[in-house]
Image: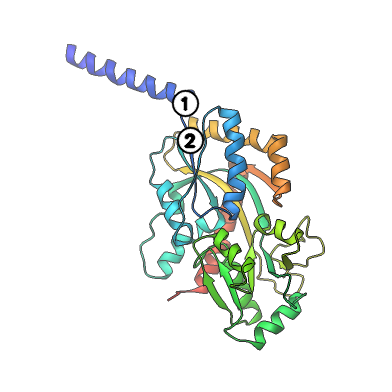
Amino acid sequence: MKRRVLIGSAAAAAFARGAAAQENYPTRPVSMVVAFPPGGQADVVGRPVAATLERIWRVAVPIVNRGGAAGAIGNAFVARATPDGYTLLMALSSMALLPEAARVNGREPTYTPEMLTPIALFAADPTVLVVPAASPIRTIEQFIAEVKSKPGQFSYSSAGNYSALHVPMAQLSQAAGLDMLHVPFQGGGPALTAILGGQVQCLASGPGPVAPHIRSGALRPLATWGRTRLAGFEDVPTLIEKGFADCEFYIWVGLFAPAATPAPVIARIREACRQVAQDAEFQRVMAASGNTLDHRDGDAFLRFYQEDAARLIRTVRALGRIE
């Protein structure tokens, strides 16, 4: 009897310590994993989010760049991390399609979307098609004509096969009957460097990374993948209005945690993210980087995420196996 009482007391004490730890979360640094090298959309949004969380929580929130496999390596790392709230993922929309891409290619996925819990959305901008400013191409019509005149030669960079920079270009190629040369890199940052360095001839990117280079005159936007014209790019037509109804793609950026993370911890992170979205300095940085703040959480983010994931999975299945 005495032994059972001691065991029961120890269990109760452990439970109390766990509850207290959740209530006081965070008490130590919180790692924010970005599944790409620096410079891409998730990194551009993730850094000001992390900086604002540091001010709110008064603990370090380091960005950890774990690039590779179009984001699958970093996504899987967080999906399998200890579910205590101290390892989070700032994910791109490609997170939802990579497991399906693995299945299409006959591989076992390294993670599934169900292994990650959506916490908060911060940005959801349509992709922007850009060419170097030195290019003679000035309109989407000229772009399509030029690509068709050089089948298999006109090149574009991406963050890897089935990445958020690859899939929209695949959509356009399918819709317009284009044969383009896909040059995959390890992330959005290197893909952007490639077009700036003259290694490729075009790029589909979130507006944040390319906006400074459009303003500087280094890149020229030709079209976007949204249903409506993008704020700040009002003179740039959408592909839908140009007759390509199936060309709709958003590079959204949202925060996720391992699925088994305790509900009280998720609630505390979600509340902190609401404070981030309302922070004036964060809003200023987002606007300066060319990203439109689109904060959603709870059921609103879940519905958006599930609807977008269904659309992306259909696109991957149409794209098929990539050798």
**171 sits to left or right of 85:** right
SS class, disc 1: loop
Residue type of the residue flagged with mark 1: Thr
Query: Who is closer to the viewer here, 183 or 312?
Result: 183
Residue 127 locus on image (x, y percent): 66, 62
Colour scheme of this structure image?
rainbow
Give the left or right position of residue 160, taking residue 192 as reference: left
Residue 98 is marked as none
Q: Residue furthest front?
A: 197
Question: In the figure, 25 relative to 76: above or below?
Answer: above
Toward which corner of the image does residue 58 lie, by quadrant?
Answer: top right
Judging by the rendered image, the residue that carries numbered circle 1 is: 27
Name which residue lies at 41% across and 52% down.
76
Q: Amino acid at mark 2?
A: Val
Between 311 and 121, the one lying in front of the other is 121
What residue appears at the point 45 percent right and 26 percent down from the top-left corner?
22
Q: From the viewer's perspective, is 96 left or right of 44? A: left
Measured as percent of width and height from the top left, residue 158 is found at 55, 66
Callout 1 environment at 10 Å: few (<14), some (14 to 19), or many (20+)?
some
**Residue identified by numbered label 2:** 30
